[in-house]
Image (cartoon, rainbow, N blue to C red):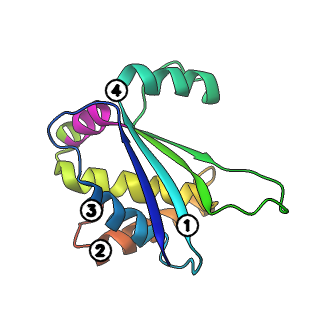
Amino acid sequence: MNLVLDVQRMLDTPGIPTDTELQTWAGAALAARREKTELVIRIVDETEIRMLNREYRRQDKPTNVLSFSLDLPSEVEVDLIGDLVVSAPVVAREAREQGKSLQAHWAHLIIHGVLHLQGFDHKDQGEAAIMESRERNLLKRLGFSDPY
């Protein structure tokens, strides 16, 4: 699989992963794909993610990551699977509150978001078990502990 990653850094705060780290984590979640894949990761503040969360999920609060799948007619061939929007301040706060390393939390959320872009979800217990198992396995292969 060939991943083309576009990283949009809308803020520059300590602890934000390098492009190489983001590429590694997203690539791990996309490893089963054989074709070229394009992905955008946009790193934002709490204001932007709150606005997007309110507009697209009807939840007026900041969140850690939002996944926006590209949904085009089948006759339109593009390599872009979608966009991830990640709030660096929310990720940092959650890592502190949960006693996790910042790098491990970033890795988990990138993998989590990319799995959403591939159709995984956690709306019910069965779906959640499948998605969380996939996350655990991918993170373990990357040297991270169980995020749950």
Establish if 85 lies above or below 130: above
Point out the tag, 2 or 4, that comes first from the N-terminus: 4
Point out the tag, 2 or 3, that comes first from the N-terminus: 3
Q: Which residue is mark 2?
A: 140
The local secondary structure at tag 4 comes to loop
Q: Which mark is residue 37?
A: 1
Q: Is disc 3 surrounded by few (<14), some (14 to 19) or many (20+) residues within 10 Å?
A: few
Residue 145 found in image quarter: bottom left
Point out the tag, 1 or 2, that comes first from the N-terminus: 1
Using the image as rendered, state which of residue 3 and residue 97 is in the foreground: 3
Residue 136 appears left or right of 106: right
The answer to if 88 sits in the magenta stretch is yes
Please report the residue visible at 38 percent of the width from the left and 51 percent of the height from the top. 109
Q: Which residue is mark 4?
A: 45
Rounded to the nearest angstrom, the CA distance separating label 2 from label 4 is: 29 Å
Camera-side mark, 2 or 3: 3
Q: Which residue is mark 3?
A: 20
Q: Give the magenta-colored segment's residue range.
A: 87-95
